[in-house]
Image (tube, rainbow, N blue to C red):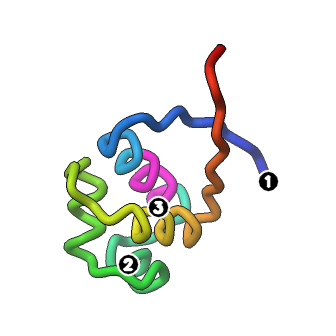
Amino acid sequence: MSRRVMRIRTMAQAGQAIREARLEAGLTQEKLAAKAGVSRSWLAQVEAGKPSIDLRKVLQAFESLGITLEAVRDE
């Protein structure tokens, strides 16, 4: 399994990361939504970078795709 580091600072970047990982995994929005326990319309909003999204659900989507988050502090 390869490891890719993504810098996520905005909801648009989080949505892009989810979309890219979903497509790489060969999942439709419907299949990922079911796997993550969220609605397809919610997932579409996340992928579009909508700013008022529940972080808990974003984390569920990341987990369903095998994406882990690490805190990195720039010095």
Amino acid type at circle 2 is Ala
* Nearer-N-terminus badge (3/1): 1
* Nearer-N-terminus badge (1/2): 1
Where does label 1 land, which residue?
1
Direction from residue 65 to residue 50 in the image, left or right: left
State the separation of the CA atoms marked 3 and 1. Answer: 16 Å
Residue extending furthest toward the top: 75
x and y, in percent, of residue 20 in the image:
45, 49
Residue 43 lies in what quarter of the image? bottom left
Direction from residue 54 to residue 25 in the image, left or right: right
x and y, in percent, of residue 71 in the image:
64, 40
Q: Which residues are magenta?
A: 17-23
Few, some or many residues within 10 Å of mark 2 (<14, 14–19, 20+): many
Amino acid type at circle 1 is Met
Position of the C terminus, as image quadrant, is top right
Where does label 2 land, which residue?
33
Amino acid type at circle 3 is Arg
Q: Residue at x 37, y 72 (%)?
A: 28
Where does label 3 land, which residue?
22
Q: Are marks 2 and 3 in contact (CB under 8 Å)?
A: no
State the separation of the CA atoms marked 2 and 3. Answer: 10 Å
